[in-house]
Image: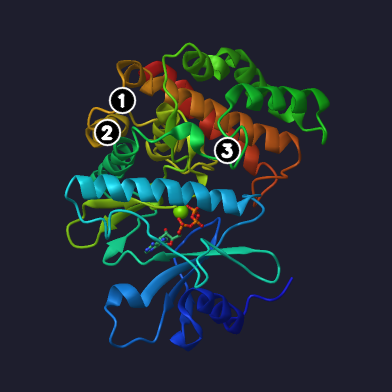
Amino acid sequence: MTALNEDRIKKIAEAFTGRDSDPVCVPFGNGHINDTFRVTINAPEAPLQERIFVLQKINSTVFRNPVQVMENVLGVTGWIRLRLEDAGLDPERRVLDVIRTLDGQPCYVDEDGECWRAYRFIRDAVCYERAETEDIFYQSAVAFGNFQHLLSDYPAQSLYETIPDFHNTPVRLRQFLDTVERDPVGRAESAAEEIGFLRSRGDLAGRLTQAAAAGHLPLRVTHNDTKLNNVMIDRETGKWLCVIDLDTVMSGLSVTDFGDAIRFGASTAAEDEPDLDKVHFDRHLYEVYRQGYIEGCQGALTDSELQMLPDGAMVITYEQALRFLADYLNGDVYYKTARPAHNLERARTQIRLLSEMEQLL
Ligand SMILES: Nc1ncnc2c1ncn2[C@@H]1O[C@H](COP(=O)(O)OP(=O)(O)OP(=O)(O)O)[C@@H](O)[C@H]1O
Ligand SMILES: [Mg+2]
């Protein structure tokens, strides 16, 4: 693999802006999945908007087919842009805008076969890692709800399934039970209580898929990474602008997008907090997010979807507990760990949240 030095990134940026553009590239943002750079080109006469962009290497370990990822992104962003224009709104800071390479491709493939893409820079906007105030969390809910609203009539089935079975909870449960059975690194005994809990909640796994199969939950465009830091917020007004990080956009269920935001955002502690006394499901934050989400959806959700929002939160929390515990039992092959029981601790926080959701929702 060729080292990713300054010269090389500059060359890659030039695939989008031309040889004479003299791009200056600096690492940018706090993303964990893709390598992100802010690029400024030397074009003193051009407006700021045309001089700065974001360059990202798509993580090829997570996304096996980056071209399909970009097809999904182009489909969805193009659609949102039209919807905004129809509504008389300026799309400039309201949707990601893909910059094509000079030869018209949605991404540039480098000498190692890695895919790079570029977006216009959304100016005067911030992304928050933590909801410092309740309103920031609320703003993110309206943004994700609005995303659902703008895409409510998009042909969701036309999107590529870029990560197969991403929220297929029955499959996750089967994989978990299989791992328990095999116990490949001899850790099952140390997690007996947690395994017992997750087994006892096995009926949760099929709750959403069965409702979808029965026609109660429609197929939607889902974002699949509805974390706070994937929402751009206006630096001046503190109001939401748009949703970013569209790599995991696929077809799925609205309630799982909602549920994952709750799992992550309506907890009083970090996902890997070892002291369970600090981990609680915050019913008030749940309500704040629910209201913001419904407001943003502007009537796009059906009655069954509205009714099943709590199920979304519980099923996704259950699914995440399965995934963390399966990784612990597999010897920590997927999630990065800093200590031997890290994945077990993560599974415990999810179990704690799920238990409290069962009481409070
Ligand atoms: N078009 C844009 N304009 C301005 N800033 C952007 C833009 N796209 C991304 N960013 C910044 O770069 C950061 C990382 O981007 P992004 O979320 O796409 O990467 P990621 O590695 O997939 O993140 P994650 O850790 O959420 O998976 C964002 O949090 C944001 O601060
Ligand atoms: Mg992100």
Label at residue 297: 2
List x then y, in percent, for residue 306.
Answer: 32, 21
- Kindly report which numbered mark, 2 or 3, lies closer to the viewer in this rendering: 3
State the mark number for residue 317. Answer: none
Q: Is residue 361 visible?
A: no
Task: Give the image quarter of residue 319.
Answer: top right
Q: Nearer the viewer, mark 3 or mark 1?
A: 3
Residue shown at the point (35%, 38%) measured from the top left: 151
The numbered mark, 2 or 3, whose residue comes first in the sequence reads 3
Which of the two labelled residues, at mark 3 and mark 1, occupies the earlier sequence position? Answer: 3
Work out whether residue 231 or residue 80 is closer to the camera in this orientation and state it.
Answer: 80
Give the residue at mark 3. 161
In the rendered structure, which amino acid carries the disc numbered 3? Glu
Q: Which residue lies under the disc numbered 1? A: 301
| Image position of 319 with respect to 137: above or below | above
Q: Looking at the image, do the residues carrying marks 1 and 2 touch, with CB atoms under 8 Å apart?
A: yes
